Amino acid sequence: MASEYIFRFLSHTSIFVIYAFGIYYDMTILADDMMRAVGPRSFGGNAKFLTIWNMNFQTFYFGLCILTDLVLSCNKRSKFGRRLCRFRDWFLAAIAFPIGMLVVLMFWLIYAVDRELVFPEWLDKIFPSWLNHVMHTTVIPFLFVDMYLVQHNYPSRKSGIFGTFVVGLTYLAWFKKLYKYWRGNGESGLKYDYIYLLWYCWHCHS
């Protein structure tokens, strides 16, 4: 049991560190490189990308897993620990897993059709491949590792869908604001129209 706990704790900690470093790298080193290459970031900054939202969701989730591991290691019958477990399981089912899956699948599907819509070729010289995979590939394997190591008690379907819907609606509202800004500043075109359409369809499906 002790070895299983240590392995689970180390796994959660390792994944958390990977995501945290990825966010740090994106906000500091990569931001400077992008500034020199293309100038200041446009309206909304990185917050306009669901990928960044997802990176923060995943970092928060695995930080929550670490906290849960520590609390339960001290007292498995702790009321706070049980509440923490319920929230962790809800966050996984409602936000971390569905948003993570959406980001990975949408990115690589659009990339396969026309990479210029999501990851233009010129970014290859600036954006490190390891960071691209942390953001768009390893998300699903990391979640599967957690689901294998932890016995989750998932929330009701209604509760899970509600959480996903709130996040989707919030992002859609934010994207509409960005879209209006792009249209008003002459930045519109197939790229923005196409991505907006994809998100609108996803919102309607949800």
Image (tube, rainbow, N blue to C red):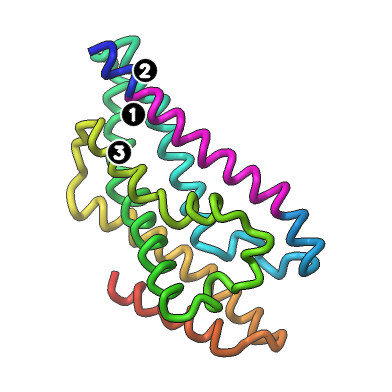
The magenta stretch spans residue 18: yes
The image quadrant where one finds the C terminus is bottom left
Give the residue pinned by disc 3.
145
Give the residue pinned by disc 2.
71
Q: Distance of mark 3 from mark 1, alpha carbons?
A: 20 Å
Q: Is residue 204 above or below residue 151?
A: below
Q: Secondary structure at mark 1?
A: helix
Residue at x 27% of width, y 34% of height: 86
Q: Where on the picture, by quarter, is residue 103?
A: bottom left
Which label sits on residue 84? 1
Residue at x 74% of width, y 61% of height: 34
Give the foreground label among 2 and 3.
3
- Nearer to me, 98 or 180: 98
- Nearer to me, 75 or 56: 56
The magenta stretch spans residue 169: no
Q: Is residue 120 above or below residue 32?
A: below
Give the foreground label among 3 and 1.
3
Pointers 2 and 3 in contact (C-beta within 8 Å): no
Pointers 1 and 2 in contact (C-beta within 8 Å): yes
The image quadrant where one finds the N terminus is top left
| Magenta stretch prevailing secondary structure | helix
Neighbor class of circle 2 (other Cα within 10 Å; few <14, some 14-19, many 20+) is some
First in sequence: mark 3 or mark 1?
Answer: 1
Which residues lie in the magenta part? 8-30
Q: Secondary structure at mark 2?
A: helix
Q: Distance of mark 1 from mark 2, alpha carbons?
A: 9 Å
Q: Distance of mark 2 from mark 3, alpha carbons?
A: 21 Å
- Nearer to me, 102 or 86: 102
